[in-house]
Image: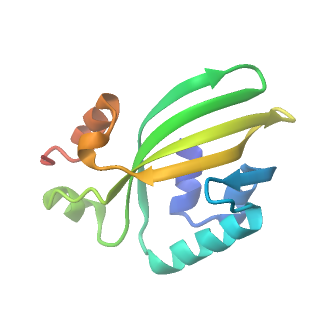
Amino acid sequence: MENVAKLAEKRKIDNLMSNLADDYFDFEGRDKDKTRDLLIQYFEQHKGIVIHILSTRFDEWDSLRAKIQTEMAISSGGAEVLRKLIKFTGETYRFKIHLLKTNRQWQVQFAEWKDVGVEELYPESFSSLKKIFPKIL
């Protein structure tokens, strides 16, 4: 997930899209093409994106399939140092992701996400967030 987050921060849309399976869809029925459009729109509206992976839980795992939940803090705009000073964390999200291994590469087959408040984060995510933003809450 760290690699995917770095690609998003650098706005590497083609690289991000290569992480999606050919039959990818999300919880709102978007396929790969519509997801590309969503990313382009998001990147146009948000400058200076910073993504912190807070934690990842493995719900299911075998040699060819996995289901994970990962929580992250996503912010954009001003410098990271200023965010820490003013206790700004941006938005916190929980992603549910189904992965499929094809040709020795894990690809996202399905994704669902929702905005969660800091108080809704898993304990391990909240602990990670406190390390990044010690003055939060």
Using the image, determine if residue 105 lies above or below residue 37.
above
- Kindly give the residue lying farthest to the right in the view shown: 103
Q: Residue at x 48, y 33 (%)?
A: 56
Q: Is residue 122 left or right of residue 34?
A: left
Residue 134 lies in what quarter of the image?
top left
Task: Residue at 57%, 33% (x, y): give it.
Answer: 68
Spot the residue most to the front: 28
Q: Which residue is more in the foreground, 14 or 39? A: 39
Relative placement, left or right, of 47 versus 41 is left
Q: Residue 106 placed where, x, y %?
A: 73, 37
User: Would you place residue 93 above or below residue 56 in this image?
Assistant: below
Q: How many marks?
A: 0
Q: Quadrant of the N terminus?
A: top right
Tell me what residue is drawn at x 65 percent, y 54 percent.
26
Image location of residue 5, percent across then percent down: 53, 51
- The x and y percentages for residue 72 are 41, 47
Residue 58 to residue 20: above or below:
above
Q: Residue sitting at 76 percent across and 20 percent down? A: 63
Q: Is residue 54 left or right of residue 45?
A: left
Q: Nearer the viewer, residue 3 or 40?
A: 40
Q: Position of residue 32 (x, y in %)?
A: 75, 61
Q: Is residue 1 visible?
A: no
Kindly tell me whether residue 48 is visible in this rendering.
Answer: yes
Q: In this view of the protein, which residue sits in the foreground, 126 or 30?
A: 30
Tell me, what colour scheme is on the image? rainbow
In the rendered image, the residue lying farthest to the top is: 62
